[in-house]
Amino acid sequence: MGQFSKKWEDLNFSDNYIFCKVMRDEDLCKQFIEILLHLKIDKITYLNTEQIIENNYENKGIRLDVLLKDSSKVINLEMQTGDYDDLILRSRYYQSSADVNTVPRRSRFKDLKENYVVFICKDDPFGYGLPCYTKKTIFKENPQISYDDKTHNVFYNSSAYSKVEDKEIRSVLEFIYKLKANSAFTKQLEASVDIAKQKGTMKDEYMYFQDILEDEKEQARELGHSEGLAAGLAEGLAEGKAKGLAEGLAEGKAKGLAEGLAEGKAKGLAEGQYSNKIETAKRMLNENCNIDFIMKITSLSKEKILSLV
């Protein structure tokens, strides 16, 4: 289900549109990250929601839900309520895109910041029942050797909130999954959601995007209908052409065969008759018959008869 498919009244914190609006509050965003990642966020130097990154017009562009920086970290937060099939590859692409977008020209590689991509999933993205999946990169030959490229990928499964020991994380995941606020922080989130939904400008913006989406769907349906008719017509023409060609070939083949047989039969008959005339002419010559008389009986030319002498 797309992010603009729900009614405005039914939206909650786990919906991408509301999540991004709430995370614009630097204090809430800072607390949210510190709880989920056990990190200390110093002064936020950059915070943007629904940021579009297009490094090159020929390359695939992306839209990040929440992207922020402090002095030592780049963090991307993604609210995910479905479509979990390609999360690992998306995480890889998001991470590299965030690096390219946030690393200044002439930076040294050793100065790259810690880079976090965090997917907060409403359900289990990988199906193993864990409340959290954290990527760890190792050397295959010796897992004990440290491989620290400063990248971190974390995938939360909100549906398994009850398995989380950390009380604050458990309350956040429960709020996402059940919309139940039972901690001071989740009550702040709940209040922020209510405030966002009371703003007429946000509702108008959401409804505007819904209208655009519906127009695009209608255009797609009309285009699909037109393309379907065109495809059906083309298919019908191609089928008719192929059928006509096949029938024409078959008819031509049959006609040609019949004509060939008739022609062959006629030719054979004519050749047989001609041979008989030659033999008759030869016998008449042997009997010293008059040339004119032989011509009359066989219909052969005088030259032909004389050639038989």
Image (spheres, rainbow, N blue to C red):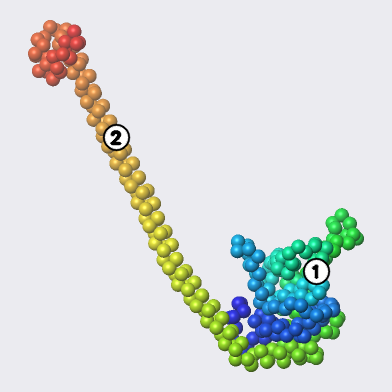
Query: What amino acid type should be assigned to the residue bearing mark 2?
Result: Gly
Residue 297 relative to residue 192: left or right: left
Q: Are marks 2 and 1 in contact (CB under 8 Å)?
A: no
Measure how far apart labels 2 and 1 are at the Cα level: 87 Å
Q: Give the answer, above or below, for where 165 lies relative to 138.
A: below
Q: Position of residue 240 (x, y in %)?
A: 37, 55
Total labels: the figure holds 2
Neighbor class of circle 2 (other Cα within 10 Å; few <14, some 14-19, many 20+) is few
Residue tagged 2: 260
Query: What amino acid type should be assigned to the residue bearing mark 1?
Result: Lys
* Secondary structure state at the residue bearing disc 2: helix
Which quadrant would the C terminus be assigned to in this image? top left
Question: Residue drawn 69% across and 71% down?
Answer: 84
Neighbor class of circle 1 (other Cα within 10 Å; few <14, some 14-19, many 20+) is many
Q: Give the answer, above or below, for where 65 lies relative to 253.
A: below
Q: Position of residue 246 (x, y in %)?
A: 37, 48
Q: Quadrant of residue 19?
A: bottom right
Residue 138 relative to residue 231: left or right: right
- Taking the view exactly as shown, the residue that stands out farthest to the right is 144
* Secondary structure state at the residue bearing disc 1: loop
Q: Give the answer, above or below, for where 20 lies relative to 187.
A: above
Residue tagged 1: 113
Question: Residue drawn 62% across and 79% down?
Answer: 3
Question: For this rendering, which residue is in front, 54 or 278?
Answer: 54
Badge nearest the viewer, 2 or 1: 1
Question: Residue drawn 75% across and 71% down?
Answer: 117
Question: Residue drawn 82% across and 77% down?
Answer: 37
Question: For this rendering, which residue is in front, 18 or 285?
Answer: 18
Question: For this rendering, which residue is in front, 199 or 232?
Answer: 199
Q: Position of residue 189 (x, y in %)?
A: 74, 88
